[in-house]
Each structure stands twice: as C-alpha cells, then as structure tokens.
Image: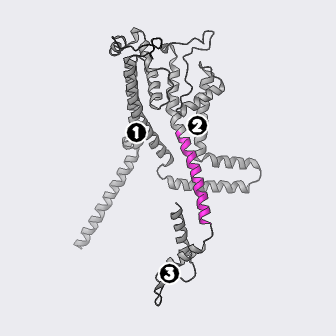
Amino acid sequence: PEHQNTTAQSIDMLAEEERQRQAQLELNRSWKRIYKRSWFISACVFVAWLLSGIIFYSTWQGWDFWVSAYFTMQTGLSVGYGTPSEDDICYAPDELLSSGAWRYVKGEGMTYPSPAENGRGGCMAGDISKLFSVVLIVVGSSIIASTIGILAKNLMNPPGGWYKQLIQEEENNHFRKIAEETEGWIDDVYVYTKMYVSKGWVRSVLALISWLVVGALYGTQTNQRMSFVTGLYFAVSSVSTGGLESIKLLGDDTPSGDVRLQLNEFPGGNWFFLTGYLMGGIPLYAWALTEIASFFTRAMHEKWERDTLCTQISEDEFQLMDFLGNFNARNEDAGEVQGDGEIDMFEFVECQLLRRALET
C-alpha cells in the first residue's frame, strides 16, 4: 500500500506539472504575454530602427517629423526616390542649420567644388548624413527582411494551420458539389467566387491591386497631378522598391501651382501618406509574390506527384519490389534471394514511396 501511495503521488505531481506547463503555454499565447511573441519583438525592433532615423534626420538635417519618417522609410526599404536628399543641408539657410551641422557646412574646407568648378557639389555635413544612411540601410534591410519573414510566417502558418487547411479544402469540395448540383450560372458564380476568395494567392493579389489603385489615385488626384499611367508607374515602382518615379514639390492645383516649393513649404500630408504607403505596400507586395510563387510551386509539385505515382510500374521496378518484399525467402541450393513473382499491397506502397524519395 505504501508503494502504491508513493506511485499515485508521483503520478499526481507529474500531472500537476503538465497542467502548469500547459497553462504557461496558454498564457504565453495570450495577449498578457504578447511581449514574448516573435512578431511583437520584431515589430518593436523595427519601431526602434524607425525612431533612430527620425531622430537623426530631424536633428541633423532640420527636417520635421514626417519628412524624417518618410526619408527613413524610403531609405531603409531601398526605394531611393531621391527627394529630398542628404545634400540639401549644404544649401539650407543658416537659420535651418543645427548647431552641430553648421560647422560642417560653413566651416573652412567643408564645402566641395560645384559642377561649375569641375566638381560635384555637396559638403561634409551631407557626407556625414550619407554615412548614417549607409548604416541605416544595412541594419534596416536585415530588420525589415526578418520582420516581413516573421509576419509572413504567422500569416501563412497560423497555429493549427494544417487542420484549418484541411477544413478549408473540405469546404471547397462541398461548395464545388453544390455548384454541380444546382441549376443556373448565378449560383455557380457565387460558389466559385467564395471558393477562390478563400485562397491565399487570390486575397494577396486583390489586396495588392487595391493598394496600387490607392497609389495611382494619390498621383492623379493630389498636387502631384500625374497622368493615370504615371500614377500607376509611381505606385508599382514604390511597392516594388524601384523608386523610379519620385514625387515633386508642387503646390496645390492653382494658377501658380506649377511653381516648385521649398521642402518646408510642401504640405506635410504628402509625407504622412508616403510613409504609410511604403510601410504597408512593400510587405504587401512581398506577400503577394510569396503567395503566387507558392501557388505555382504547389501546382507543379502536385502535377509531378500525379505523373510519378500514376505511372505504370516498369519491369525493373517489379523485379526490385519482388526482390525486396521476399528478401528472407532464400534458395538454399543456389544461395540467392528469390521472389514469389507477385507484388502485394505492401510492396506496391513501398514502390511508390521509393519513387517519391528518388524523384525528389
């Protein structure tokens, strides 16, 4: 009895430890322990990186918050619009220069020869800002890449994703049967639309198209006054980090609206929009490319699997499976392994597994 009591107590202790462990895991998955989640940590690192750029450019270049945020974002994401530029500090009025940057702009030998003097222009202050941008790009590229990867992993592989995918496939099969059994084409359109909208690549493509439309509307309906093609060109080159079409510092659409403005005169809402547009559009573009590539890869793999597994067993495969399946049946006189001339279900499955392993 004493031994039994000890065993029962040990079992109870193990069960209690398992309950506590499960409770801890559940707590970690809840919002109370959000700080332990990988996507939250990566998001915090990203925000810290963004704030470092904002603080430097607003202090050194003299830009306001949203100009600094926009420039940090488009620099770290390697968009490279070119407007504004680090060299703008070299031609800024004295009242806009910070005390730390003033000596590297106005100091002796700090200004480089202009193009008229067979030079390129610029100054030491601009080079210091460019050196910081180099560090910002190198660090930001790794941070942004890891952040996008973690977010994509959480979106594409959520907890329980494997059985949710099975449930979704069964729902699609159910919808497909409904479409086949009902009469008329309206029900079929509704059913197949519901089926395809549930697919990741369709959702990502629709989201990307919507985002491109937003960018095109910004280019055509604001003070940028782009044509539709130029607006679409701006949107696509922005989310793909091409940066081939930059914004222009234009005023509102008035008789004098074609006059270029100074950076501090340009409406701040443009910088706010562009910062958010890049922050949302580039991960969205990466998500769409990932989903499309995954769709084609999965389709090609399924076709290969069908072609491989549905191919008739060759004579060489038959002999190999017959040999492996009857390896212990030896001819005592000849000392050789002999098959029974037949392939059972176990040998057939073994053949298919070997086919997959060898082909992959």
Q: Residue at x 55, y 24 (%)?
A: 246
* Residue shown at the point (37%, 47%) measured from the top left: 28
Foreground pick, 145 / 160 = 145
Most common secondary structure along the magenta stretch = helix
Looking at the rendered structure, the kind of residue marked 2 is: Leu
Q: Residues within 10 Å of mark 2 (few under 14, many from 20)?
A: many
Is 101 colored magenta in this rendering? no
Please determine whether, in this image, residue 322 is positioned above or below residue 83.
below
Q: Secondary structure at mark 2?
A: helix
Residue assigned mark 1: 42
Q: Sequence order check: which comes first, mark 2 or mark 1?
A: 1
The residue identified by callout 3 is 326
* Residue 290 belongs to the span the image colors magenta: yes
- Furthest toward the bottom, the residue is 333
SS category of the residue bearing label 1? helix
Q: Which amino acid, mark 3?
A: Asn
Residue 280 spot, x, y in % from top left: 51, 33
Q: Position of residue 290 (x, y in %)?
A: 54, 44
Q: Residue at x 37, y 18 (%)?
A: 125
Q: Quadrant of residue 319?
A: bottom right
Q: Which residues are magenta?
A: 286-310
- Towards the viewer: 308 or 280: 308
